[in-house]
Image (cartoon, rainbow, N blue to C red):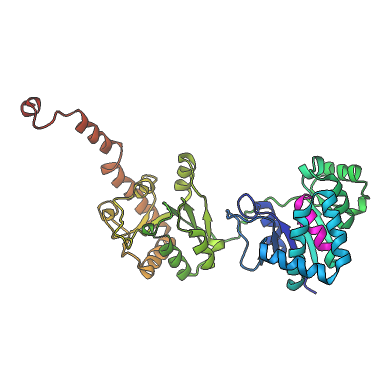
Amino acid sequence: MTRKIAYIISMVKSGVPAFTYREIDILHNNGFEIALFTLAYREGPYMPRAQWPVFKPSLYSMLISHICRLLSRPLLYLSLLTTALKTGTTREFALGMQFAGQMRKWGATNIHCHFGDSKLYTGYYCAVWLNLPMTVTMHAYEIHRNPKPQMLKIALTKCEKVVVQSEFNKECVMRNFKLPPEKIALIRAHGDMSKGTEPPVARILMVGEFRYKKGHEVLLSAVKKLNRKDIVVWFVGGGHLDVPQIAREMGLNNQTVFFGMVGRDILNVLYDSCDLFVLPSRTAADGDMEGIPAVLMEAMSHGKPVISTRHAGIPELVEEILVDENNVDELAEAIAHLVDNPELRDKMGRRNYEIVKAGFSDDAVLQLGKIFTDPPAGTQEGRHS
């Protein structure tokens, strides 16, 4: 029988924590079905794979769930509510009743909680209601400075196994919570994301405010059309256009990384690390257009090949490769051409560096300084200079 593991996590900071992602990915690749029950949800570098269902807090679902739970098993419901009131875990109880119904519908066979804090408390209410085996991975702070020690002791009694990652933590858990050694599993964290046998991935960088004229949707559509797993797109920027949502709707979660707004030092690292830079600029319905985007000059100054559009002043900077605005097919073809030709990328990158050095570098800025220092043409000094 396939084990279906309900993973209770939090994505409060930036997506799935990297070490949790690795763990879930390995389990999934070895035949386990995984669903994520997250106490909070925020986009980040590691987002759930399409094969991992994600369940998030929902006020409507929560209200309906509690009505159903109370009517179906009032004594158990009131008993768990009493525990929640005594231990200060009413939020976890509220979530637990919602998740319990969703776990049952999904067909969960096991519950695993990552961290022995609110995730474990939520899991406890699910496990008691569903009578499912529950395990927990405990790391550090929740062992030594748990904010709700009374609830922790109650929840640990329900756990089949408590997973720790060091002998030190194993001793602490045994001593602090009076657990027998056979209930504790020492499993070291998996820390290596690199696999030398995996094919290389082409890293496309796009930098710009999330606005229509930048063409984020055009780039995503081109990547979607290519349907290649050896391409990942890095996005830097932010704005009113929900580019992460567009990527999700296209099924590109695992091929897109959103860095948000970053400082100059990090941006320079991204420029140096990418394989090519793409900016499919286009004209907005209200006529809003680019000039010559500075990010194109920046990418070229780092010796990177660029793909852009025949838009506004861009052809004055970019010799190649230019495509028509909003032309997804042409952009996809250009991307594939560069991805498949690393020698061409290097050649274009070197040429782009020379272009920027010749006409768009610090020397060009000094021409502005000359304007400041030259006397006005209409003055006596200007006429005789």
Residue 114 image point, x, y percent? 75, 54
Residue 140 image point, x, y percent? 77, 43
Residue 84 vs residue 9: left or right? right
What's the magenta bit mostly, secondary-structure-wise? helix
User: Along the line of sight, which residue is nearer the eye, 86 or 104?
Assistant: 86
Determine if the magenta segment contains residue 125.
yes
Residue 295 image point, x, y percent? 37, 48
Say which residue appears at 20% left-offset and 33% top-offset: 371
Q: Is residue 381 above or below residue 14?
A: above
Please indicate, yes or no, whether residue 230 appears anywhere in the rendered image: no
Determine if the magenta segment contains residue 379.
no
Say which residue appears at 56% left-offset and 62% top-offset: 253
Q: Is residue 259 above or below residue 335?
A: above
Residue 368 image point, x, y percent? 24, 35
Q: Is residue 252 above or below residue 39?
A: below
Please indicate, yes or no, whether residue 18 appears anywhere in the rendered image: yes
Q: Quadrant of the N terminus?
A: bottom right
Say which residue appears at 48% left-offset and 59% top-offset: 243
Q: Magenta stretch: give its range.
A: 113-128
Q: Quadrant of the C terminus?
A: top left
Residue 226 vs residue 110: left or right? left
